[in-house]
Image (cartoon, rainbow, N blue to C red):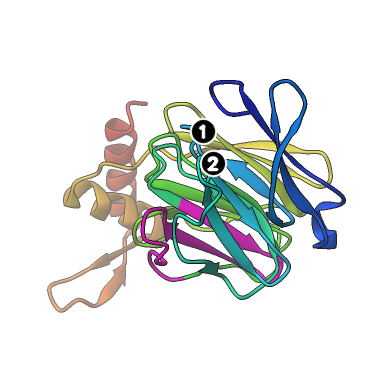
Amino acid sequence: FTPSGRLLVTVEGKVLDWDDASVIWQAAGTEAEARSSLGLAQLSLDGKRLLTTDGTGTARILSLDTGLDVTPPLVHGERLSRVAFSPDGKLVATASLAGSAGVWDGTTGERVGPFLRHAEKVFALRFSPDSTMIATGSFDGTARVWHSGSGRPVTPPLEHEHHVVSLAFAPDGRSLVTGTGDGFVRGWDLTPIDWDLARLILEAEVASMRRFDATESARRLAPDEWLTQWWAHEATSGR
């Protein structure tokens, strides 16, 4: 539905048959206009634009007022499995069955950053509430969180034992929930670690049991040295 409740968008047929059509309906139940052949459709939050896909690996952003393209076609080049508008409406994302996701400028249609890569098909796609991050879930058993403006990873790959098929950010964007094909749901803390250099060095020494000397050579900590660092770690952790 559009926010006004006056229009409803439906997709005819099976999503991955690629013979489907987007149909826009008036609130009274009469067909307004069939916009394009597609496999997927999503409305922008302001209800003014429609994001559609087709079997050629291309997405289109259409104006609901005119039915015309708002941007040039978004040429992903691989069959698409998911599409999404960012909550602020400035970006759109596409995910493919060939294992990649793309982020695009919703005004110009230009790609933003590199393609986001997985080893297998990407079947889940979600922007964070503030639009600064995008999460992808794949049949390779991982979810990834990326910076939506640069494509840089925000976290290491979030490993699962089965296909990742659904994603949801918490309203504050500080955690992510993933769902897998074997019926499990997992939560992930995305809160940034705000440590200074001294804390980073301490944590590295406790974890590795090694210390870099002035020549940048690593030496193994003596037991008493490591124990001293361990107690410092406990104190700074608030335990």
Q: Is residue 94 left or right of residue 98?
A: left
Residue 181 numbered mark, or none:
none
Image location of residue 57, percent across then percent down: 65, 70
The quadrant of the picture occupied by the C terminus is: top left
SS at badge 1: loop
Q: In this view, does 74 lie above or below 148?
A: below
Span highlighted in magenta in the image: 92-114
Q: Nearer the viewer, residue 178 or 41?
A: 41
Residue 134 appears in view: yes
* Residue 170 in the image: above or below residue 156: above
166 left or right, relative to 63: right
The residues bearing labels 1 and 2 have C-alpha atoms spaced at a distance of 8 Å
Which residue lies at the image location 49% right of the left edge and 33% below the top edge?
Answer: 45
Residue 34, position in %: x, y?
71, 48
| Image coords of residue 143 (percent x, y) | 60, 53
Query: Element under label 2?
Result: loop
Circle 1 or circle 2, nearest the eye: 2
Residue closest to the eye, 141 or 220: 141
Left or right, residue 126 beside residue 89: right
For residue 99: magenta? Answer: yes
Question: Is 196 a magenta residue?
Answer: no
Point 39% across, 66% down: residue: 110
Task: Evaluate if marks 1 and 2 touch, with contact meaning CB atoms under 8 Å apart.
Answer: yes
On the question of residue 142 being in view, the answer is no
Q: Residue furthest left?
A: 214
Which corner quadrant holds the N terminus?
top right
Q: Quadrant of residue 188?
A: top right
Q: Mark 2 points at which residue?
A: 64
Q: What residue type is labelled 2?
A: Leu
- Which disc is residue 47 wearing? 1
